[in-house]
Amino acid sequence: TPKPVGESGVALREVRTVGVVGSGTMATGIVEVFAKAGFDVTYVTRSQAKVDGVRAGVEKSLEKAVQRGKLDATDRDAAVGRLTGSTSLDALANVDLVVEAVVEDLAVKQALFENLDEICMPGAILATTTSSLPVVDIASVTGRPADVIGMHFFNPAAVMKLVEVVHTITTAPDVIATVQDLCGRIDKQPVTCGDRSGFIVNALLFPYLNDAVKMLSANYATADDIDTAMKTGCGLPMGPFELLDVVGLDVALAIQRELYLEFREPGFAPAPLLEHLVTAGYLGRKTGRGFRTYS
Ligand code: 3HC
């Protein structure tokens, strides 16, 4: 049977089963997105406690979706039934696509992709959710850089519709077309871009967030007034400090540093206050304190 053809006219690879690696906020959200869309999802974390944690996180978010009338209870149960958790990457031997969402550390991601390269079947697509590292640095440690691509989801992944599809100079056209098509199947809006730090959204968003931190440090205005100004004046759902606390200040700092390294714009140097908050362990909502304190 002929393979379906994507919008670009390229024959698509078949994607029926999906693997997700990681146990954090993004991994949990991505597991939910694929399971809700009808894919069998095998997710791999480093411990049984984390396997259980991801499942609990997915169940909690699906329950929220049911309560908000976004999902019916039968579909929730079906989605939960499509989840398989494992502590071994060997569980990914037969999946068509792997989405990596582990810590934003190049050495960790490279070691993982070396393992995936050995374990996954030929033709499987290997996707990274990195938000700041060059995708080609991850692709190049594998023997199949043509099969490696970026799929950058946004936080919270279950709700935010955008996925940036990031191709490197080595990504095969059918891999790009397949992932673009796949985004539609999981109810996401894809945009496509090259492999530059920050892709589209973060390259524009983080210089603004960094400027907000500098404005606060200069005692120019309070965090509350800056947040209110941007929400009320620009119609944004969250002000810069609310958003930074949700994203995580450690993640924000890592992205800001990568942008600075790549673009060398003096204004992109991370605001000292952001550095200090991270050093102090005030990482945002996840630690109970960032620019604000949470109970
Ligand atoms: N499952 C499905 N739908 C859900 C849900 C869930 N678990 N939780 C909420 N929703 C839906 C709600 O039903 C609602 O839909 P509706 O408007 O059609 O009724 C919608 O999501 C909004 O939910 P709420 O009204 O309860 O909540 P808020 O009004 O507080 O909105 C938010 C939540 C959409 C997350 C909003 O706060 C927002 O847009 N925040 C900004 C998020 C953002 O900018 N993210 C990008 C960060 S940058 C990034 O991720 C890049 C990385 O590299 C750092």
Image (tube, rainbow, N blue to C red):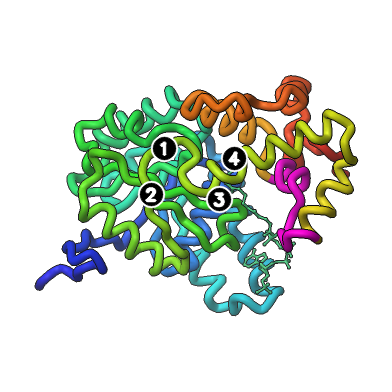
Q: Which residue is mark 4?
A: 49
Q: Quadrant of ligand 1?
A: bottom right
The number of numbered discs placed on residues in the rendered structure image is 4
Q: Mark 1 and 2 residues: CB-CB less than 8 Å, in contact?
A: yes
Q: Nearer the viewer, mark 2 or mark 3?
A: 2
Q: Position of residue 270 (x, y in %)?
A: 65, 26
Label 3 sits on residue: 28
Q: SS for tag 2?
A: strand
Per the image, label 4 sits on a secondary structure element best described as helix
Residue sitting nearer the eye, 109 or 71: 109
Q: Amino acid at mark 2?
A: Cys
Q: Answer left or right for 124 relative to 272.
A: left
Of label 2 and label 3, which has the lower sequence position? 3
Spatial CA distance of label 2 from label 3 is 25 Å
Give how far apart the Cα atoms at labels 1 and 3 are: 26 Å
**Which mark identifies residue 196?**
1
Q: Answer few, some or many: residues within 10 Å of disc 4's Cα (few below 14, many 20 plus, some between 14 and 19).
A: few
Q: Quadrant of the N terminus?
A: bottom left
Tell me which numbered mark, 4 or 2, is placed earlier along the sequence: 4
Point 46% across, 43% down: residue:
199
Foreground label between 1 and 4 = 1
**Residue at 31% in and 36% down:** 116
Is disc 3 placed on a helix, strand or loop?
helix
- Residue at figure coordinates x 23%, y 39% from the top left: 170
Crowd rating for badge 3 (residues with CA inside 10 Å; few <14, some 14–19, many 20+): many
Q: Nearer the viewer, mark 4 or mark 2?
A: 2
Say the numbered circle drawn on residue 193. Answer: 2
